[in-house]
């Protein structure tokens, strides 16, 4: 009896084991992988849900099912899944990581489809499509754009009776005056964590402004130039000469820098436009967080604006490229662009900024100013597929210089040599 | 006398410090979960929320997929526990009571499987799950978690079954009890501390695991809590209030299970330590 009960229990357990959760996809269901969550009440999530719902309600013959993966894991998962033939039909790729996907063959060229777009539409992107071109093929279309800016806490600057700095020299002096007690005048994420993103996002625009480049046409590191040396000397002086930044930034990443600004323990940093809204979502920060173009080494011209985009593209494994393309076009429509703009994402289409939202609301006007900065000074340097190694090398060089264990030239030479040795 | 007091004071101080180290982060997590948004990153920090609010907890329960992840974790942990114990108890009993060729080699082989780092077999596991159609399913996760836990359970329970006197089982056989019935009605009951401590180990392992569930699932409807916590660390920053609230909710079942079964866990581990 007990044996029978036991076996029955085991059988019901097996039944409860529940069948495969992988939806028996109908032929017209498209899988879309993105870093944005599809559940919850975040404004971006709501915007994405609205866009997907309106597409699914249409008569395209396709239905999109969104699967969300954390932004730090999505690219590895796409590569792994595509290798197993399970890759998504539509995927979100960050511009810095496009080369990685190209070399991993996880995405397919869009040339034939882009060619069907009117020329006016092809030229309607804040981040031009030439930056999506790899090996002569357009590999993705940007659905939002982002630009790096000087973030500053207006309350702290006002309290110290300081104006928004117009040059890097002025910024260093202001940072020195703002640094007192637990407050750092300027902060950056100089650690190697988070792929060294904080370090390279600060270093790159300053390097460009100093006349340098990260890589040459063959992908070899050339940031160990006089321009690179000038930038690292500046960061060192910011710590040791102006006392505007603490040496503890070597342990901080981009998230820590953002948290410092929100907490009021730092007055200025260089951050992406896409994070401004989230950083203001605090009773302490609110509208005291303002942005300006990143000042340059000389007066009157800001640094070139580092641009990046989240893009949409078609997965290599898809059998429904037509449906994937239809959804991408829907995602780039004026209505979708506006929906995301209201959720604090800068539209990727130039024409989107003509909507009244960008001239009548504070958020819209601010985005419009960012787009203007991007348009005038924007620059997008295609990152290599081994971008994490490049970023980690730059971060280590900055750390050595700030900690005084190497001079700028030696630190950059070592980083460039290490990078070039494996490329 | 004075020396003994000093020693006692020192031991209490060390224990207090150790407790603070262990409990401090959990208390800070609780404090952060109950803080209004404006106090989350305040500097200097507010040690206590002023006033305490359940807003972060409300948000994770009502405006995120956390309840789904929680349900998934309960299903996968429960099923993995049942299957691991069902296999582990029978196998451990057989090994404890029977002598057969290759027994020692089998035991060593079982132990060796526990020594393989999980990360080393993730890619093969992923491919297997895709090829077998078990990718993104509860079944796939339950099979892997059960397989992962059974070897260590067998080793743990083997010692307990060996400690149950054979004479009691033999007396039951003489009274007409079948071998299987004697196992279910007598041996299993006598080995209860070991089974409960093994159960705690399985629960903690499955509930806390990130790598396996992250690798074998893709949709919110199949992911476990450990992966769900990551949703509060986004491209746009970290939502500290919600992350801490979700962490508290994720901790609760394991803490409750531990409190309910801690006596058996200690008994079980101590017995296992000398009986192995």
Image (spheres, coloured by chain):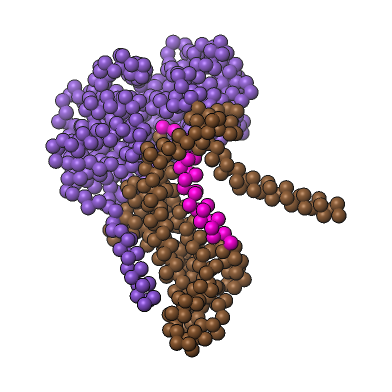
Q: Which chain is purple?
A: A
Q: Which chain is brown?
A: B
Q: Is residue A7 magenta?
A: no
Going by the picture, which residue comes out furthest to the bottom? B174
Q: Position of residue A216 (x, y in %)?
A: 39, 31
Residue placed most toward the observer, A62 or B203:
B203
As drawn, A273 above or below A16: above
At x 42% / y 39%, what residue is drawn?
A: B60
Residue placed most toward the observer, A334 or A232:
A334
Relative to A86, is A384 on the left or the right? Answer: right
Residue A23 visible within the image: yes
Q: Position of residue B92 (x, y in %)?
A: 48, 74
Q: Position of residue A402 (x, y in %)?
A: 58, 29
Residue A421 visible within the image: no
Magenta stretch: dominant secondary structure: helix
Rendered-image quadrant of the N terminus of chain A: bottom left
Rendered-image quadrant of the C terminus of chain A: top left
Residue placed most toward the observer, A265 or A9:
A9
At x 53% / y 74%, what residue is drawn?
A: B190
As drawn, A11 above or below B38: below
At x 16% / y 31%, what residue is drawn?
A: A115
Residue A128, by quadrant, is top left
Which stretch did the figure color magenta? B236-263
Q: Is residue B244 magenta?
A: yes
Q: How many marks?
A: 0
Residue B120, by quadrant, is bottom left
As drawn, A3 above or below B28: below
Residue placed most toward the observer, A5 or B158:
A5
């Amino acid at each position: 009896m007990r044996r029978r009960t036991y076996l029955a229990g085991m059988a019901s357990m097996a039944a409860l084991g529940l069948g495969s959760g992988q939806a028996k996809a109908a032929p017209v269901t498209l899988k879309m992988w993105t870093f944005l969550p599809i559940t919850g009440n975040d404004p971006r999530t709501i915007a994405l849900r609205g866009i997907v719902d309106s597409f699914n309600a249409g008569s395209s013959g396709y239905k999109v099912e969104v699967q969300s993966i954390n932004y730090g894991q999505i690219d590895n998962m796409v590569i792994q899944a595509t290798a197993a033939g399970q890759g998504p039909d539509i995927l979100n790729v960050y511009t810095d990581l496009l080369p990685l996907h190209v070399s991993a063959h996880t995405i397919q060229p869009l040339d034939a489809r882009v060619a069907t777009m009117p020329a006016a539409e092809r030229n309607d992107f804040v981040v031009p499509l030439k930056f999506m071109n790899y090996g002569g093929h357009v590999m993705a279309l940007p659905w939002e754009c982002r630009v790096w800016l000087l973030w500053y806490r207006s309350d702290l600057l006002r309290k110290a009776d300081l104006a928004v700095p117009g040059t890097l020299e002025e910024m260093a002096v202001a940072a020195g005056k703002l640094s007192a007690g637990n407050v750092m005048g300027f902060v950056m994420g100089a650690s190697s964590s988070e792929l060294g993103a904080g370090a390279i996002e600060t270093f790159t625009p300053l390097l460009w402004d100093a006349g340098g480049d990260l890589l040459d046409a063959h992908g070899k590191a050339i940031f160990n130039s006089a321009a690179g040396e000038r930038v690292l000397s500046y960061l060192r002086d910011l710590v040791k000469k102006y006392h505007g930044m603490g040496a503890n930034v070597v342990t901080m990443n981009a998230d820590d820098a953002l948290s410092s600004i929100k907490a009021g323990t730092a007055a200025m940093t260089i951050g992406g436009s896409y994070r401004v809204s989230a950083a203001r979502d605090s009773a302490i920060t609110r509208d005291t967080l303002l942005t300006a173009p990143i000042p340059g080494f000389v007066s009157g011209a800001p640094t070139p604006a580092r641009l990046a985009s989240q893009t949409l593209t078609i997965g290599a494994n898809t059998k429904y490229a037509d449906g994937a393309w239809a959804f991408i076009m829907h995602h780039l429509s004026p209505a979708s662009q506006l929906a995301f703009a209201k959720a604090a994402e800068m539209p990727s289409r130039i024409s989107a900024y003509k909507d009244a939202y960008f001239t009548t609301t504070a958020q819209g006007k601010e985005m419009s100013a960012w787009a203007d900065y991007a348009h005038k000074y924007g620059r997008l340097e295609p990152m290599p597929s081994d971008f994490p190694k490049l970023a980690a090398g730059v971060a280590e060089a900055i750390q050595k210089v700030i900690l005084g264990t190497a001079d700028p030239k030696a630190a950059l030479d070592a980083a460039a040599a290490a990078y070039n040795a494996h490329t | 006398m004075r020396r003994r007091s000093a020693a006692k004071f020192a031991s209490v101080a060390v224990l207090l410090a150790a407790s603070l180290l262990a409990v401090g982060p959990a208390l800070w997590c609780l404090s952060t979960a109950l803080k209004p948004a404006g106090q989350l990153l305040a500097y200097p920090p507010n040690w206590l929320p002023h006033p305490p609010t359940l807003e972060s907890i409300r948000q994770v329960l009502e405006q995120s997929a956390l309840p789904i992840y929680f349900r998934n974790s309960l299903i996968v942990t429960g099923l993995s526990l049942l299957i691991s114990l069902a296999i582990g108890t029978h196998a451990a009993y057989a090994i404890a009571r029977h002598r057969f060729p290759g027994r020692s080699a089998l035991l060593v082989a079982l132990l060796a499987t526990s020594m393989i780092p999980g990360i080393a077999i993730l890619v093969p596991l992923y491919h297997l799950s895709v090829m077998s159609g078990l990718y993104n399913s509860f079944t796939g996760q339950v099979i892997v978690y059960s397989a992962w836990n059974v070897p260590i359970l067998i080793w743990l329970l083997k010692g307990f079954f060996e400690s149950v006197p054979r004479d009691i089982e033999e007396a039951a056989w003489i009274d007409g009890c079948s071998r299987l019935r004697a196992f279910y009605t007598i041996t299993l009951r006598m080995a209860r501390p070991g089974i409960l401590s093994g159960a705690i180990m399985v629960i903690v392992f499955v509930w806390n695991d990130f790598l396996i569930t992250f690798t074998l699932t893709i949709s919110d409807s199949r992911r476990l809590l450990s992966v769900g916590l990551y949703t509060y660390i986004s491209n746009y920053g970290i939502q500290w209030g919600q992350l801490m609230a979700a962490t508290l909710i994720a901790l609760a079942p394991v803490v409750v299970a531990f409190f309910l079964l801690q006596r058996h866990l200690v008994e079980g581990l101590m017995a296992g330590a000398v009986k192995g």
